[in-house]
Amino acid sequence: MYEETGYVCQIVGVLPGVYKSSLSGTAMFVMYPLNEQHPYSWETEEYPLGQCC
């Protein structure tokens, strides 16, 4: 999480189910931030709300 968002987080829950694609699966976690947001990776781009992808 830190590299992509700038947050150090603690996992506090897991959402049920695994979302599968033809090549992999994705599990979703509920997390709680443990710090103030720090600068994130240069690979993470900023998009205005509603204008992503």
Image (cartoon, rainbow, N blue to C red):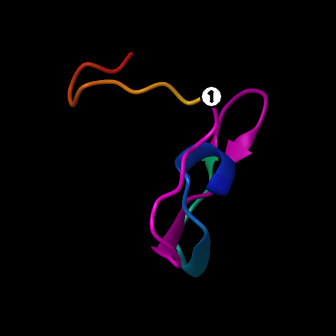
Is 46 drawn above or below residue 16 in the view shown? above
The residue nearer to you, when weighing 53 against 4, is: 4
Question: Measured from the top left, where is residue 29 in percent x and y?
Answer: 55, 66
* Magenta region, residue range: 20-43
Which residue is pictured at 54% across the width and 46% down the height?
39
* Residue 15 seen by the camera: no
In the rendered image, which quarter is residue 1 located in? bottom right
Name the residue type under label 1: Trp
Type of secondary structure dominating the magenta stretch: loop
Q: Secondary structure at mark 1?
A: loop
Residue 10 included in the magenta stretch of the image: no
In the rendered image, which quarter is residue 36 located in? bottom left
Question: Measured from the top left, where is residue 26 in percent x and y?
Answer: 65, 48
Is 13 drawn above or below residue 38 in the view shown? below
Q: Quadrant of the C terminus?
A: top left
The residue nearer to you, when weighing 26 against 31, is: 31
Is 46 drawn above or below residue 15 in the view shown? above
Is 17 drawn above or below residue 25 in the view shown? below
Question: Measured from the top left, where is residue 52 in percent x and y?
Answer: 33, 21
- Left or right of residue 25, residue 8 in this image: left
Residue 27 included in the magenta stretch of the image: yes
Which residue is pictured at 60% across the width and 78% down the height?
11
Which residue is pictured at 76% across the width and 37% down the height?
24
Q: Residue furthest right?
A: 23
* Residue 29 seen by the camera: yes
Q: Residues within 10 Å of mark 1 (few under 14, many from 20)?
A: few
Question: Measured from the top left, where is residue 2 in percent x and y?
Answer: 64, 56
- Left or right of residue 12, residue 1 in this image: right
Which residue is pictured at 53% across the width and 79% down the height?
34
Q: Give the residue number, with chain letter if any, for mark 1.
A: 42
